[in-house]
Image (spheres, rainbow, N blue to C red):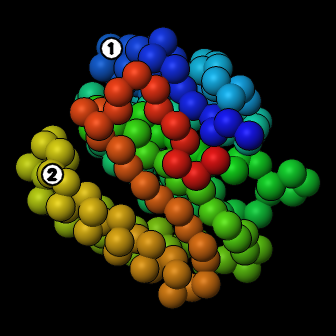
Amino acid sequence: MDSPFISKDGLDTVKKYVFGQRVEACGFLFQGPELEVYFESYGDNKMCQHSHYTRYIWHTHPHNLKAYPSPEDIVKIIKARPPKNYPKVSIIFTTWGIWEVSSGSRLDNLDPDYLLQKIDATSESLYRNTERGRVLEKQPVHDYIQTVLHNFNKKGIKLRLNFTPWDEIRDRYYLRNP
Ligand SMILES: [Zn+2]
């Protein structure tokens, strides 16, 4: 089966939300292999909320917000969601590039506060090492990902978190954890 991807048109669409808006936008990617970028709503001055979940959900962090996932963005994906366990992958489009968060395991007895705190501390250091989140620096981003993954693995949670900068994306973006 062909890997699902977002076409150049789809990427142009999401970039308009990232670089042209001051509020989060969110929606769904419908299965392709070419994924259709479906816009659902804006989050007025707060996190954008999906009305429901599908396999692939997306939201933006526009240019005036942080260019990396919030702790809630990451923890949300591992909370149990019967019956279909959706979403499988949460895609976050930011000024730096594309983040994917997905989980191979779900835990009902998860302690979200512990994980939120750990991610918060890790995000702090990313913030400091990127001129307050403004300048993309690849090494701090790499360190951030490794530390977050380590904290989840320690708890037996198979989290996947990856990042692709815009300048490494040519015409299409293939999902890295479909
Ligand atoms: Zn977010």
* Residue 31 position by quadrant: top right
Q: Is mark 1 within 8 Å of ligand 1?
A: no
Name the residue that disc number 2 marks: 137
Local secondary structure at mark 1:
helix
* Residue 11 position by quadrant: top left
Give whichever of 73, 101 is nearer the camera.
Answer: 101
Residue 77 image point, x, y percent: 63, 57
Q: Is mark 2 within 8 Å of ligand 1?
A: no
Give whichever of 164, 45 is nearer the camera.
Answer: 164
116 sits to left or right of 49: left
Tell me the residue at 47%/32% (across/down): 173
Tell me the residue at 30%/71% (across/down): 121
Precedes in sequence: disc 1 or disc 2 = 1
Marker disc for residue 121: none
The correct choice, above or below, for 39 with respect to 176 in the image is above
73 sits to left or right of 138: right
Looking at the rendered image, the disc whose residue lies closer to the viewer, 1 or 2, is 2
The correct choice, above or below, for 159 with respect to 170 in the image is below
Judged from this view, the residue extending furthest toward the bottom is 154
170 sits to left or right of 41: left
Marker disc for residue 20: 1
Amino acid on which disc 2 is placed: Glu
